[in-house]
Structures are given as structure tokens and as C-alpha cells.
Image (spheres, rainbow, N blue to C red):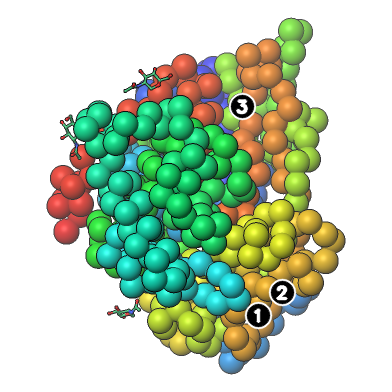
């Protein structure tokens, strides 16, 4: 291994694979290694036997659950916004040709003890049982303002400068109550806590527009899409992209030790006694444990069921967001459900996840509000994992480390981390202003 790589990427998680794809397209010389003999790292997809090995110390799942190979259970389950940044990245890199997507049936929010469809526009606001009669009318006016808002057309701003007005001020202009603000902020704008209320309203308005425009794109019941056979397809699709542009992939490489020069800058990676030289290292937190700090913990439950989540209009695939305030918690809880209609389970079976940022050491107790919404279950597994963030300075050591996956069941924060890393590595901003309509015509 005499040649020098521009970048060595360690770990084949979703974030690392998207990055190595993007860097290869930029004509950087990329070597991508993983200590495991499979793709995906923490974000791999498991079949039934792998699931039993991991959680039950056995490789004999009950035969009533059907064939093991029919299961593709994502360890990091996430839906994509149809017009969101990940989809734009997939189109920009033409990775869509390796994947098939299908719309997600439902997008729901937990409010006052019940599950409700998330209203996305003025018409749905008028029909939604989430609000009383007068509140519906106020919400309708707010939705119309957001729908009409055009950053480059001041006539649509109604005299408000959204880079200065806070979300709280904008919402109070429409007189919306806290309950309405809660579902708009957490289930439509997908904020994870309430800081957005004191931040400029422009971000929240853009997020609401993204939700509404994504919903229109596929005429499904939600703004989300998800690949057939699960997210495990995604790292492999980016690996194929990387290979097309000359990137090299090596799985099953033990150790993967990062080497540093006398100035403390990463200069190579050693595996099985051989060192590959490089200018930069990109990796997940597990490859450089001395350069990350623990920032939290995710609690998750994985359930196999024989029915959809109750009260979601029989949705085969659905996200339900349980905002923190509704549960008296500090962090939102997320429900994710997918089924044989996306080819992640055999006919008649559903895979559901309940996830949240852990506030205790008892996931069974902590996740109960979400699990109570699932109805009867065939099997359930509980787990917690630690979340890490980089604590190094990449300008000093040339190490670009991703952040562990958060408990959200959509890709918005994941992709932001990837794009921030891309900019730190290359000094460039990815131009994602692709024409989505032209792209979707090509998909037909
Ligand atoms: C936003 O406003 C600009 C400037 O008036 C205009 O060119 C553009 O077409 C508008 N966009 C939409 C989506 O209406
Ligand atoms: C809005 O406020 C920002 C920041 O103060 C300023 O740069 C911008 O020009 C303002 N826009 C309009 C349309 O007044
Ligand atoms: C329930 O789903 C069906 C399609 O499966 C759809 O036509 C109907 O509008 C949905 N109902 C609600 C309340 O979302």
C-alpha cells in the first residue's frame, strides 16, 4: 500500500458511506475500511437470526415469525423527507438508480393522550380534531401565511422580518395556543426541543414549508419516503457510487488503528500490520474513542407485531412523534413502524420502534408511553446505547468524526451532520439545488 489516499474512511455506517460517496464524486482518492464483515456498522439492518443473536443469545427465532431472510430490521430506523436534504443528495449523486422508494403511509402526533394525523396545510388544519373551532381558524391563517411565504418576495412577509422575529413572536401574532404550538414545532417543523421558540422564525417557517411540499410530492399520507428492503440498502448504494468514481472498499479489516505524525496529525491507518497513508481520516466515534465525549444515551425498543399501530388508519408505515411536553419529559419520543409493504418483514408482520433520548437507566419503564400505543406484540427487545460527539479539533489533527445517531425517526439531523462534515473536510458547500420535479419525472 504505497500510494497515499486523500481520505481514509473508517466504518460503513450511513454517515460515513454518504461521505465517502460524496468525496469520491469530488475525485478525491478514497479508501473505505470497516472492522466488520458487513456494511452499516451501528446503522446496519439485521435479519431475524442476527436479531436473536444480538438480543437473545440464541440463533433460533420462533418459526411462527416466518423466514429470517425476509426481515431487514434497521438498527437506526429513519424515514426521509421526500424533498429533504438526503433525497436531494441521492438525486445529486444519482444514487437513486440503485434504490427503490415507496411513500410512507402516515405521519401522526401524540396529543392529550391520543394519536392524531399531523395536519400539514390550511385545509387539514380546518378538519383536524387536534384543535377546537376557533383555534382551527387561527391555525388556518397561520398555515396560509407559511404556505405563501417566499423569502425572496417581501410582499409575502406581511411586514415581518423573519430573520429577526422569533418563532414565539410570530406565533403570538396568530394567537395560537401552546397545544397547537407543540405539534407544529415538534411534529411539523421537527424541532427536538423548545429552543426554536426563541430563535428567528425563518428556520421554523422553512421547515414547515419543507413538510408541506414533501407531502405534495408523492400524494401519500405523509411527507416521508423509505427504501424497499430497508436502510441497509443505502450504505451499499453509496459504496457502489464510490466504486464508480474509483473509491476502494475493504470490509473485515481488524483493528484499523489511526496513525499520527510528530505534529499529532492523522497520516495513515494500520490494519493487519499494513499501513495505508492518507491526508485525512473520516470515521465514526468507535474508531477514535480518545477523541470523542459521551453526550447522552438513546433508549430503544424493537417490536415485531402482526398488525399496524392502532389509530393510524391501518398505516403499514408510519411515524408518530410524542412531544416532550405531552409526556412531561425533557425529550421527544418517536415511534417508527414499517412492514412487509416495504419488504422489511414477511407478509403480515410489522416492525415497530420506540425511541427517545434516555433520561433514566430503565428503558422498559421510560418507553412505556410509546409502547402502550403499539397494541399486542409478538416479540420485543430493549436496548440503550451511548451517544458520542467529537471533542477534537480537525484543523489540528485532520480527524473528522461523526456524531452518534440520535433517536429521531427522520433523517433531518443526520444529514445536517454529514453536510457539516463535508464542508469541514472539503471547504466547500454541497450545491443541492436540484430540480426535484425533473428528477421525479425521471423516476417514473
Ligand atoms: C418567490 O419570489 C420570487 C421573486 O418575486 C419569484 O421569482 C419566485 O418565483 C417566487 N417563488 C415561488 C415559489 O413563488
Ligand atoms: C431583515 O433583517 C436582517 C438582519 O437584521 C437584515 O440583514 C435584512 O436586510 C432584513 N430584511 C429586510 C427585508 O428588511
Ligand atoms: C385512510 O387511508 C386511506 C387510504 O388507505 C385514505 O384514503 C383516507 O383518506 C385515510 N383517512 C384519513 C383520515 O387519513
Label 3 vs 2, first from the N-terminus: 2
Q: Are marks 2 and 1 in contact (CB under 8 Å)?
A: yes
Between the C-alphas of marks 1 and 3, the distance is 40 Å
Between the residue at mark 3 and the residue at mark 2, the CA separation in whole angstroms equals 37 Å
Badge 3 local density, few (<14 within 10 Å), some, or many (20+)? many
Q: Nearer the viewer, mark 1 or mark 3?
A: 1
Q: Position of residue 344 (x, y in %)?
A: 47, 72
- Which circle marks residue 372 in the picture? 1
Residue 93: image location, x then y, percent: 32, 38
In this figure, which residue is indicated by the disc labeled 2? 368
**Mark 1 or mark 3: whose residue is earlier in sequence:** 1
Quadrant where the N terminus sits is top right
| Residue plotted at (38% across, 58% down) | 139
Residue at 80% x, 30% y: name it.
290
Residue drawn at x 59%, y 64% as measured from the top left: 322
Q: Quadrant of ligand 1?
A: top left
Describe the element under mark 2 as helix, strand or loop.
helix
Residue at 29% x, 35% y is 157
Asked if residue 388 lies left or right of residue 314, the reply is right
Neighbourhood count class around disc 2 (C-alpha, 10 Å): few under 14, some 14–19, many 20 upward: few
**Residue 437 seen in the figure:** yes
Query: Would residue 287 appear left or right of 219 to someone viewing this image?
Result: right
Q: Residue furthest bottom?
A: 64
Cα separation, mark 2 vs mark 1, equals 6 Å
Residue that label 3 marks: 400
Q: Is residue 52 visible?
A: no
Q: Is residue 194 left or right of residue 290?
A: left
Classify residue 321 by image quadrant: bottom right
Judged by depth in the image, the label closer to the viewer, 3 or 2, is 2
Amino acid at each position: 500500500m504505497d500510494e497515499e489516499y486523500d481520505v481514509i474512511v473508517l466504518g460503513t455506517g450511513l454517515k460515513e458511506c454518504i461521505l465517502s460517496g460524496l468525496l469520491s464524486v469530488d475525485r478525491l482518492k478514497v479508501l473505505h475500511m470497516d472492522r466488520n464483515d458487513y456494511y452499516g456498522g451501528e446503522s446496519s439492518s439485521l435479519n431475524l437470526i442476527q436479531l436473536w443473536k444480538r438480543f437473545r443469545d440464541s440463533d433460533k427465532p420462533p418459526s411462527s415469525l416466518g423466514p429470517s431472510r425476509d426481515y431487514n430490521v434497521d438498527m437506526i430506523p429513519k424515514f426521509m423527507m421526500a424533498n429533504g436534504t438526503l433525497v436531494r443528495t441521492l438525486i445529486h449523486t444519482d444514487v437513486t438508480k440503485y434504490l427503490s422508494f415507496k411513500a410512507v403511509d402516515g405521519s401522526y402526533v401524540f396529543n392529550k393522550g391520543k394519536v392524531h394525523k399531523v395536519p400539514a396545510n390550511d385545509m387539514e388544519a380546518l378538519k383536524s380534531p387536534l384543535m377546537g373551532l376557533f383555534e382551527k381558524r387561527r391555525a388556518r391563517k397561520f398555515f396560509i401565511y407559511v404556505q405563501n411565504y417566499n423569502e425572496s418576495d417581501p410582499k409575502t412577509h406581511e411586514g415581518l422580518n423573519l430573520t429577526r422575529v422569533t418563532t414565539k413572536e410570530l406565533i403570538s401574532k396568530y394567537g395560537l395556543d401552546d397545544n397547537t404550538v407543540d405539534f407544529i414545532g415538534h411534529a411539523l417543523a421537527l424541532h427536538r426541543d423548545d429552543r426554536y421558540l426563541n430563535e428567528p422564525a425563518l428556520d421554523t417557517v422553512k421547515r414547515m414549508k419543507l413538510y408541506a411540499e414533501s407531502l405534495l410530492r408523492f400524494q401519500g399520507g405523509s411527507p416521508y419516503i423509505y427504501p424497499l428492503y430497508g436502510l441497509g440498502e443505502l450504505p451499499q448504494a453509496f459504496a457502489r457510487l464510490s466504486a464508480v468514481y474509483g473509491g476502494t472498499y475493504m470490509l473485515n479489516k481488524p483493528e484499523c488503528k489511526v496513525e499520527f505524525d510528530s505534529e499529532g496529525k492523522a497520516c495513515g491507518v494500520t490494519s493487519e500490520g499494513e499501513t495505508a497513508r492518507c491526508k485525512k481520516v473520516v470515521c465514526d466515534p468507535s474508531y477514535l474513542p480518545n477523541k470523542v465525549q459521551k453526550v447522552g444515551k438513546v433508549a430503544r425498543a424493537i417490536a415485531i407485531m402482526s398488525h399496524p399501530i392502532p389509530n393510524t388508519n391501518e398505516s403499514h408505515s408510519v411515524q408518530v412523534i410524542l412531544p416532550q411536553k405531552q409526556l412531561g419529559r425533557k425529550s421527544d419520543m418517536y415511534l417508527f413502524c414499517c412492514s412487509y409493504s416495504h419488504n422489511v418483514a414477511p407478509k403480515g408482520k410489522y416492525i415497530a420502534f420506540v425511541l427517545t433520548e434516555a433520561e433514566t437507566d430503565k428503558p422498559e419503564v421510560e418507553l412505556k408511553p410509546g409502547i402502550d400505543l403499539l397494541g399486542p406484540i409478538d416479540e420485543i427487545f430493549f436496548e440503550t446505547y451511548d451517544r458520542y460527539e467529537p471533542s477534537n479539533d480537525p484543523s489540528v489533527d485532520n480527524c473528522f468524526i461523526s456524531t452518534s445517531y440520535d433517536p429521531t425517526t427522520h433523517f433531518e439531523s443526520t444529514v445536517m451532520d454529514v453536510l457539516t462534515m463535508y464542508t469541514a473536510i472539503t471547504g466547500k458547500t454541497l450545491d443541492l439545488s436540484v430540480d426535484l420535479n425533473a428528477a421525479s419525472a425521471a423516476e417514473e
